[in-house]
Image (spheres, rainbow, N blue to C red):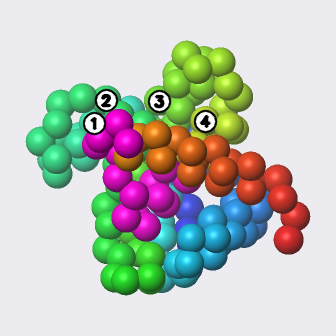
Amino acid sequence: MIEFHYKSDFRIEDKTQYSDWISRILVSEGFHAQQIDFIFCTDEYLIQLNKQYLNHDTYTDIITFDYSTGKSISGDIFISTERIEDNAKEFNVSFENELLRVMAHGLLHLMGHGDKTQGEQRLMRKKEEEKIKMFHVEQ
């Protein structure tokens, strides 16, 4: 089950379109959804989680808590929409494109992809771009 929650004013307009896209991402990598919760929040909400659970005192666009087992994906993906907006401006992309990138990033983490080394980062970026392109594909 894929669910969307809000700790800010932001709202996903077409939940079905996003849920279908997320499902296609999982299938494309050989996984299926158990319980995936996307929580859209503010910078302040996310930095508090970062401090409390990860002992990091820095702003970030995403924090992913992974409860997956094998090919069954389960987790909480917290996304700061304020960071998304700032990053979209910085990278000169649309808000939607940056939102899709970060959502895909969280899913890829739940599927075991890392981003600590340069090699992992390159693969992560490649897969993010591949998954963003899947958003507008009709099934």
Label 4 or label 1, whichever comes before in sequence order: 1
Residue behind mark 3: 83
Residue behind mark 1: 47
Quadrant the C terminus occupies: bottom right
Does 9 sit above or below residue 13? above
Cβ atoms at labels 1 and 2 below 8 Å apart:
yes
Image location (x, y in percent) of residue 59: 31, 29
Cβ atoms at labels 3 and 4 below 8 Å apart:
no
Identify the residue at horizontal 53%, vertical 32% (top origin). 84
Label 3 or label 1, whichever comes before in sequence order: 1
Whether residue 87 is visible: yes
Residue behind mark 4: 98
Asked whether residue 38 is drawn in magenta, I would say no
Quadrant the N terminus occupies: bottom right
C-alpha separation, residue under disc 4 versus residue under disc 2: 16 Å
Which of label 3 and label 4 is nearer to you? 4
Q: Is residue 114 left or right of residue 28?
A: left
C-alpha separation, residue under disc 3 versus residue under disc 4: 10 Å
What stretch of residues is rendered in magenta?
104-119
Residue 79: image tag: none
Identify the residue at horizontal 17%, vertical 36% (top origin). 56
